[in-house]
Image (tube, rainbow, N blue to C red):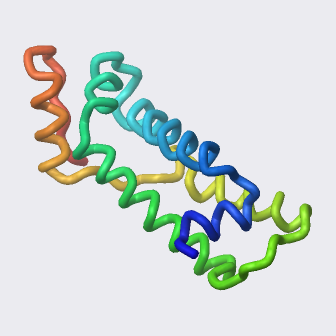
């Protein structure tokens, strides 16, 4: 099983729930770190570079979650109370407000290219 499948099994998330969480928290991250700028959110939605970076950040946190909880290789469903607790821990670790990393210059340049001429410049922090 890959990390995503292990996490889905441990937390009870469906594939759609998992993918929706990745997308929603990615948009929340943009809002939290750069403000509620509609053109920026639209640019982000269109930026393959941003989503590639974001998925790498998510995968890193998935690995951290599996390591911290020692769930790797645990291939039987967890009891409901443990599954609920695992989901709670997973959501805290993946909450956009708790992710304080920033994309590199390449990703920022790609976003700037999409929002060119809108007087918004994205720079790495």
Using the rendered view, name the quadrant where residue 38 is placed: top left
Vertically, is 27 above or below 36?
A: below
Residue at horizontal 53 percent and vertical 52 percent from the top: 98
Residue 80 versus residue 112 in the image, above or below: below
Viewer-nearest residue: 120 or 77: 77
Query: Left of 31 or right of it: where is 42?
Result: left
The residue positioned 71% from the left and 65% from the top of the image is 9
113 versus 66 height, above or below: above
Task: Please identify the quadrant where the N terminus is shown.
Answer: bottom right
Q: Quadrant of residue 77?
A: bottom right
Asked if residue 111 lies left or right of residue 113, the reply is: right
Q: Residue at x 13, y 17 (%)?
A: 119
**How far across and how far down the image is residue 79, in percent?**
90, 69
112 vs 12: above or below: above
Q: Quadrant of residue 10?
A: bottom right
105 left or right of 72?
Answer: left
The residue nearer to you, when weighing 98 against 82, is: 82
Judged left or right of residue 3, residue 52 is: left
Residue 69 in the image: state x and y as whole percent.
Answer: 68, 77
In terms of depth relative to the viewer, which is nearer, 119 or 60?
Answer: 60
Tell me where residue 50 appears, x and y as whole percent.
Answer: 28, 44
């Amino acid at each position: 099983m890959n990390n995503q499948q292990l996490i889905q099994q441990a937390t009870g998330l469906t594939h759609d729930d998992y993918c929706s969480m990745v997308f929603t928290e990615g948009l929340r991250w943009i809002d939290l770190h750069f403000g509620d700028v509609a053109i920026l959110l639209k640019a982000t939605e269109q930026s393959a570079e941003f989503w590639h970076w974001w998925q790498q950040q998510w995968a890193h946190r998935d690995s951290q979650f599996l390591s911290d909880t020692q769930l790797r290789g645990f291939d039987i469903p967890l009891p409901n109370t443990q599954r609920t607790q695992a989901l709670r821990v997973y959501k805290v670790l993946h909450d956009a407000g708790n992710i304080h990393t920033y994309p590199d210059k390449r990703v920022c340049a790609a976003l700037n290219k999409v929002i060119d001429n809108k007087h918004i410049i994205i720079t790495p922090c």
